[in-house]
């Protein structure tokens, strides 16, 4: 296939995916979603008697949609009953009814392709602005869709054979070198919540839809899980508890809710709680020292503890309250059933497959996984199931290799039907298929988490960096606190994951990474100091203004009250004096109250004048100052 043909195939295949999702949203059943593509193909064929296999081939070439032959036959049977085609001698002819043209389908395809082209153009322009050498929009398209296929679709389908579906024309190895750029761009698209995010969701959900439908028995897609007990692995529970970042917490919460709504029972084996406490004990032992922190591989759990500055005491608290925290998520903690060897197949072989080295089958993590798989098989009591709906129990994890090795072991042991373990994305897809409208942005949240994982540095590079960091600390080039800050910095991950760094960076390159991160931390600290100083100045200015207002208003109140009291004293003196004069003019003795009102102010004023040089003006001002002072003290307390 030429490059131009491949590009056209890719565009047509991606449009078909989005159109499948549109048909699904319209409420069509799980076969009727494919019907418009089959009818469009028939309407555009030389139709003088063709086989179902020929129609199957034409659908694949026209729409990049490879459907199983039984599905083609079922759809043709529906068209025959509707009078759109006629079957005679194993071949199909035009029916008595007019076969509608493909105007609506072509219009929808054109609109869909235009929307997707805009997303690809945005990616191409974004890459060019950052100096990323993506030479054409065709390569940009392959980079984006190749990333989604490798990191989402294929991850969910590991261990299953699904050769049918939509052919996007993207080769398996398409532009893996651009994975980092694709991951960064996709994160920005999702965060932007724009039309491009809608197109991305449409595309991703189309992928999930067609692959999950062809993986599962389509008749089960609308049925609820029949009491399926879903046992969560420790890595998923750490995420659900918010200990692996916000993205993982949202993802786990969405899945737990969706499973419960669809009739499943989210549970946890008690052995998994003990496994989580064992992991937490490792962090408790290592977080207290610089050497211990450097020995921790940068998982999401490690990043959370480092960036939150968690102490060993914090880890002990998390561990001691773990059961209560897990139950608060809506999960039931369950004891594993009594071990029955007749149902659990050969567990020693499974332990060997899950271990990375001889003797590794005794590592606590491997023992835990074997115990959980054996517990699920025991709960099933030797029965096999063709779908997850009635599979009774399943162990779910986000560890790809654990799923691959366990499924391979199960099949080698003669197991059939649904395996006892599955990947998070596989179960998520099946749950989503039953009720997409209730899943919200679940699929986009999954993609964000996968993008974050793709942006992490390779283990080899990280180990080299830790060794170099240790040597720099021993030589005094960096302090223990600086080492902790460098390890917790997100910039460290980004720099170490840079393609230009390579898989075997030298000491000079690693030192440059350290210096860049230190400079970034200093800049960040300087910015925070500047922000703090600005905030302090703003607060000081506000306080000054507040104090001025208090001072001014206290003075106003003091002045007003002093004048009121002075006026009352003057009124008392005047009233007493007038009353006494009236009594004297009448030949009567003055009234006692008049004497008090008139004489008391004069007597007090005379005594105070002799003792302290009292006068009304100074008394009023003293009174004003005293009242204002007491009022300021009261308002400021």
Image (cartoon, rainbow, N blue to C red):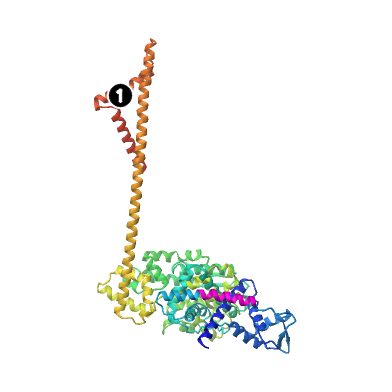
Label 1 neighbourhood size at 10 Å, few (<14), some (14-19), many (20+)? few
At 33% across and 70% down in the image, what residue appears? 486
Queried whether the magenta region covers residue 481, the answer comes back as: no
Judging depth in this view, the residue of 88 and 241 nearest the camera is 88
Q: Residue drawn 44% across and 71% down?
A: 276
Q: Position of residue 304 (x, y in %)?
A: 40, 68
Q: Which residue is mark 1?
A: 604
Q: Which span is picked out in magenta?
A: 103-118
Residue 188's place in the image compared with 215, above or below, is above
Q: Is residue 113 magenta?
A: yes
Q: Looking at the image, can residue 334 be seen?
A: no
Measured as percent of width and height from the top left, residue 202 is found at 55, 73
Q: Residue 595 versus residue 367: which sits nearer the camera? A: 595
Q: Quadrant of the C terminus?
A: top left
Look at the numbered disc 1 and give the secondary structure of its residue.
helix
- Describe residue 454's horizontal placement relative to residue 210 as left or right: left
Kindly give the residue lying farthest to the bottom in the view shown.
89
Residue at the limit of the structure toward the right, as seen here: 96
């Amino acid at each position: 296939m030429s490059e131009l043909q491949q590009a056209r195939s890719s565009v047509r295949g991606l449009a078909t995916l989005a159109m499948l999702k549109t048909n699904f949203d319209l409420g069509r059943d799980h076969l009727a979603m494919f019907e418009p593509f089959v009818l469009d193909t028939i309407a555009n064929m030389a139709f003088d008697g063709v086989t179902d296999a020929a129609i199957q081939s034409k659908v694949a070439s026209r729409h990049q949609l490879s459907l199983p032959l039984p599905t083609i036959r079922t759809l043709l049977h529906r068209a025959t009953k509707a009078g759109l085609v006629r079957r005679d001698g194993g071949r199909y002819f035009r029916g008595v009814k007019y076969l509608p043209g493909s105007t609506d389908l072509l219009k929808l395809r054109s609109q869909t392709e235009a929307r997707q082209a805009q997303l690809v153009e945005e990616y191409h322009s974004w890459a060019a602005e950052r100096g990323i050498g993506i030479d054409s929009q065709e390569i940009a398209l392959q980079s984006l869709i190749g990333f989604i296929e490798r990191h989402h679709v294929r991850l969910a389908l590991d261990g299953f054979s699904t050769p049918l579906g939509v052919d996007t024309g993207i080769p398996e190895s398409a532009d893996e070198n651009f994975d980092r750029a694709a991951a960064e761009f996709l994160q920005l698209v999702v965060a932007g919540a724009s039309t491009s995010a809608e197109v991305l969701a449409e595309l991703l959900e189309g992928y999930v839809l067609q692959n999950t439908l062809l993986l599962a028995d389509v008749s089960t897609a609308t049925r609820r899980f029949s009491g399926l007990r879903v046992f969560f692995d420790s890595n998923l529970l750490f995420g659900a508890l918010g200990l692996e970042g916000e993205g993982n917490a949202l993802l786990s919460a969405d899945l737990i809710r969706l499973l419960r709504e669809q009739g499943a029972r989210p549970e946890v084996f008690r052995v998994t709680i003990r496994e989580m406490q064992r992991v937490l004990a490792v962090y408790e032992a290592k977080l207290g020292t610089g050497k211990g922190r450097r020995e921790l591989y940068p998982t999401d759990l490690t990043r959370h503890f480092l960036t939150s500055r968690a102490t060993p005491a914090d880890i002990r608290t998390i561990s001691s309250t773990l059961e209560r925290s897990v139950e608060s998520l809506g999960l039931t903690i369950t004891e594993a059933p009594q071990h029955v060897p007749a149902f659990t197949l050969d567990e020693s072989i499974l332990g060997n497959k899950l271990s990375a080295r001889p003797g590794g089958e005794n590592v606590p993590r491997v023992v835990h996984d074997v115990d959980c798989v054996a517990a699920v098989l025991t709960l099933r009591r030797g029965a096999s199931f063709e779908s997850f709906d009635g599979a009774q129990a399943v162990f779910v994890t986000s560890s790809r290799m654990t799923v691959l090795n366990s499924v391979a072991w199960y099949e080698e042991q003669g197991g059939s039907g649904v395996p006892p373990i599955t990947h998070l994305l596989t179960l998520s897809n099946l749950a989503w298929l039953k009720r997409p409208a209730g899943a919200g942005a679940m699929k986009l949240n999954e993609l964000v988490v996968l993008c974050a994982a793709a942006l992490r540095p390779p283990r080899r590079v990280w180990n080299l960096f830790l060794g170099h960091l240790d040597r720099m600390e021993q030589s005094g080039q960096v302090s223990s606190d600086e080492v902790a800050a460098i390890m917790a910095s997100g910039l460290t991950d980004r720099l170490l994951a840079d393609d230009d760094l390579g898989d075997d960076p030298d000491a000079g390159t690693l030192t440059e990474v350290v210096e860049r991160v230190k400079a970034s931390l200093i800049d960040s600290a300087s910015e925070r100091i500047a922000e703090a100083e600005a905030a302090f100045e703003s607060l000081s200015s506000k306080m000054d203004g507040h104090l001025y207002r208090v001072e001014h208003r206290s003075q106003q109140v003091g002045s007003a009250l002093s004048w009121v009291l002075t006026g009352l004293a003057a009124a008392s003196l005047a009233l007493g004096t007038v009353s006494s004069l009236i009594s004297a003019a009448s030949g009567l003795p003055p009234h006692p109250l008049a004497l008090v009102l008139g004489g008391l102010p004069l007597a007090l004023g005379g005594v105070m004048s002799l003792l302290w040089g009292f006068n009304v003006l100074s008394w009023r001002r003293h009174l004003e100052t005293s009242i204002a002072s007491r009022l300021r003290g009261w308002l400021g307390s």
